[in-house]
Image (tube, grey):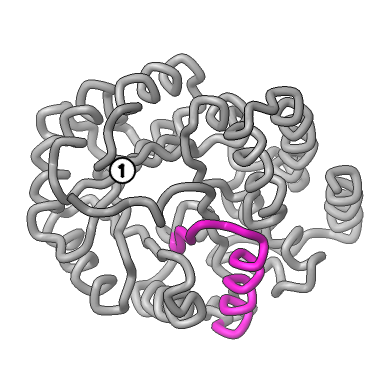
Amino acid sequence: MMDLERYKGVFAAAPTPFFADGTVDVETAGEMVDFYVEGGLSGIFALSSTGEYFAMPQAERERMAEAVVCAAAGRVPVMTMVSDACLSVVESNIQIMAERGVDAVVLTAPYYYKYSQQELERFFVRAADMSPVPLLVYNQPTRLPSGLSEELVVQLADHPNIIGLKDTSNDAARLGRLAAALAKREDFLYYAGSESLAAYAALLKVNYVYALACVEPQLFVRMQAMARSGDVAGVLEAQGRVERLCELFRVMGGGSAESFSNFAAAIKAAMEVKGLGRAYTAQMGRLPSEEEYRKVHMILERTT
C-alpha cells in the first residue's frame, strides 16, 4: 500500500501565471511555488480549474508542469490535471505529465456528454489501470454534466492506483457522509474543494485543495492545525476570515458563476498585490480595473 502521509493537509489549487501573449511566466510560477511551500502548504495542484487547464494549449500546460515540478524540487508533491472528453487523449496526457515528473494526476469526468455512473467507473478504472503515477478523481458538478455519486467514489477507492478524491460539490451533507464512509481508509484521501465548507472539512479531518490557499496559505494551514488540537472556536474564527477572503470571487462582476476568466483574474490580482505576477488570464479575460484592484487590497487587509 502506498504511503499517503505526504499527500495530507492543504494543497494549493494554483493559478497559472501568464504573460500578456498567453505564454506561461515560468519565473513567476517558480516564485509562487516558493510562496506556497514557505506558507506551509503540503502540496500543489497545478493546471487545476483555477489554473485554467481547459483554456490552455498543450505546450503551455507542459511548460507549467515542468516549471512547478522544477521549483518544487521534491519539497512537496505536485499533481496536475489530465482531463479530456476522449479517453485516449487522457491516457496520452497522463504519460506526458508523468514524463514531466509530476507525483500524481487528477482526472474529472469527461465533459460535454452526460454519462452513467457505470460508464464513469469504466472511464476512471481504465485511466488508473494504465497510469504510471497515482490518480485522483475530481468531482466538479457545477462545471461538468456528470457528477460522481457517493457510491461510485467508495467503489473507486478500492482501486490500488486511485488514491483520492477532490470534491467541489459545495454540499455539506455529502461532505459529512463521504468523510464518514472514508474515515477508516489509509489508502484513499478526501480533499474538500469548497472554501465555504473549510471549517466543517477541518473538523471532519478532511484535506483541502483550495484556490484561496494560494492567497493566504497560513490561514488554512492554521485552521487544520486548530481542528487537530480541538480548538473549535479558533476554527470558527478562521472561517470568518475565510468568508471575508471569499469576497475575492465577487470582485470582477459576478465571479465564477458569470465569468471564469474574471474569477481567475481576481485570484491572480490578489497574488499580484503580494508581488507575484500579473492578473493575465489564458483567454478572453481582462486585467482588473483600478477600482477592482482597490477592492482586492481592501479584502486582503480585512483578512490579515
**Direction from residue 49 to residue 299 in the image, left or right:** right
**Direction from residue 206 to residue 216 in the image, left or right:** right
Please say whether residue 302 is visible from this viewpoint. Answer: yes
Residue 211, given in percent of the width and then of the height, sits at 59, 50
Q: Residue at x 74, y 45 (%)?
A: 248
**Direction from residue 152 to residue 221 in the image, left or right:** right
Residue 164, given in percent of the width and then of the height, sits at 31, 43
Q: Residue at x 70, y 74 (%)?
A: 277
Question: In the figure, 169 relative to 174: above or below?
Answer: below
- In magenta stretch: residue 181: no
**Direction from residue 115 to residue 74 in the image, left or right:** right
Front one among 216 and 80: 216
Q: Residue at x 32, y 51 (%)?
A: 4
Tell me which segment is drawn in magenta.
Answer: 26-47
Residue denoted by label 1 = 164
**Element on which disc 1 rests:** strand
Please say whether residue 52 is visible from this viewpoint. Answer: no
Question: In the figure, 80 relative to 57: above or below?
Answer: above
Q: Residue at x 23, y 50 (%)?
A: 85
Residue type highlighted by circle 1: Gly
Front one among 225 and 152: 225
